[in-house]
Image (spheres, rainbow, N blue to C red):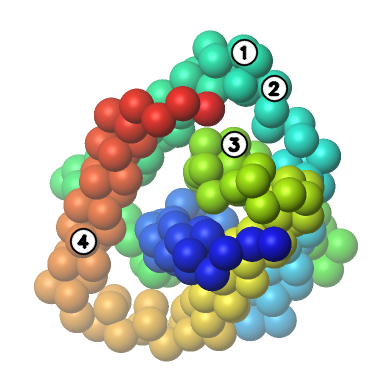
């Protein structure tokens, strides 16, 4: 029903996106450093619930609207490219911060941790870009069961995102301490992040593939 190449392709895209710092990573790492691993894992559960919202939307065929209204697709694509470019500038600019720089966040209860993770995920433009612009390109109507293909590929993205974000949560404090004690490494990490963000922003802005 779904070819291995499609599964591998969406997994590679999901991995590239999850390794590029964005709202989800920044929030999860900051929360884990400020309030501990348990808080980070609860927040991660909220992020996962937010991803399920996108899977439900793409499975229901809502993204087909963008084929009928190309302007909406272009607006989201260019907005996403602009957002990634802004994130790149935040990494490159003098005094820019790394996702692993210690952040001061006030402790909050479990229910709010979950809700904040959920909202961070649902409102994350990187995730919207994956599901609106990229995932449909891996669905092959000739294989049949388009909704089932969308659901499976969306599940692959969630598995990749939760696995690596979970690793970030579990290692956030150790990585933060390591980088903070080594300013040069922290600067290299910021510049590498900025370069990756710039690359994705350029690719997204110049991509001519249809919705």
Evaluate if marks 1 and 2 touch, with contact meaning CB atoms under 8 Å apart: yes
- Residue mark closest to the camera, 1 vs 4: 1
> Residue 150 or 43: which is nearer the viewer?
150
Image location (x, y in percent) of residue 160: 56, 70
Disc 2: CA contacts within 10 A as few (<14), some (14-19) or many (>=20):
few
Rendered view: 162 above or below 79: below
Circle 1 — which element? loop
> Residue 22 or 10: which is nearer the viewer?
10
Evaluate if marks 1 and 4 touch, with contact meaning CB atoms under 8 Å apart: no
- Residue mark closest to the camera, 4 vs 2: 2
Image location (x, y in percent) of residue 41: 69, 76
Q: Which residue is mark 2?
A: 65
Q: Which residue is mark 3?
A: 132
Q: Residue 69 has which mark? A: 1
Q: Which residue is mark 4?
A: 192
Residue sitting at 46 percent across and 52 percent down? Answer: 22
Q: Earlier in the sequence, mark 1 or mark 4?
A: 1
How far is the residue under mark 4 from the one under mark 3? 27 Å
Disc 4: CA contacts within 10 A as few (<14), some (14-19) or many (>=20):
some
């Amino acid at each position: 029903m779904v070819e291995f190449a499609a599964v591998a392709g969406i997994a590679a895209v999901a991995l590239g996106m999850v390794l590029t710092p964005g709202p989800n990573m920044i929030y999860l790492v900051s929360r884990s450093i400020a309030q501990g691993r348990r808080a980070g894992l609860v927040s991660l559960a909220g992020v996962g619930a937010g991803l399920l919202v996108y899977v439900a939307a793409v499975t229901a065929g809502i993204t087909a609207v963008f084929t009928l209204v190309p302007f909406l697709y272009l607006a989201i694509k260019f907005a996403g490219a602009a957002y990634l470019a802004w994130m790149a500038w935040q990494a490159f600019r003098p005094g820019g911060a790394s996702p692993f720089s210690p952040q001061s966040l006030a402790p909050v209860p479990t229910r709010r941790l979950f809700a904040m993770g959920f909202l961070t995920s649902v409102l994350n433009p990187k995730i919207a870009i994956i599901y609106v612009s990229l995932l449909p390109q891996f669905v092959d109507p000739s294989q049949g069961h388009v909704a089932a293909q969308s659901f499976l590929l969306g599940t692959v993205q969630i598995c990749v995102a939760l696995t690596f974000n979970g690793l970030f949560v579990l290692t956030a404090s150790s990585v933060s301490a390591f980088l903070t004690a080594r300013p040069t490494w922290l600067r290299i990490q910021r510049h590498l992040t900025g370069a990756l963000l710039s690359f994705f922003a350029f690719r997204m802005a110049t991509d001519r593939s249809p919705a």
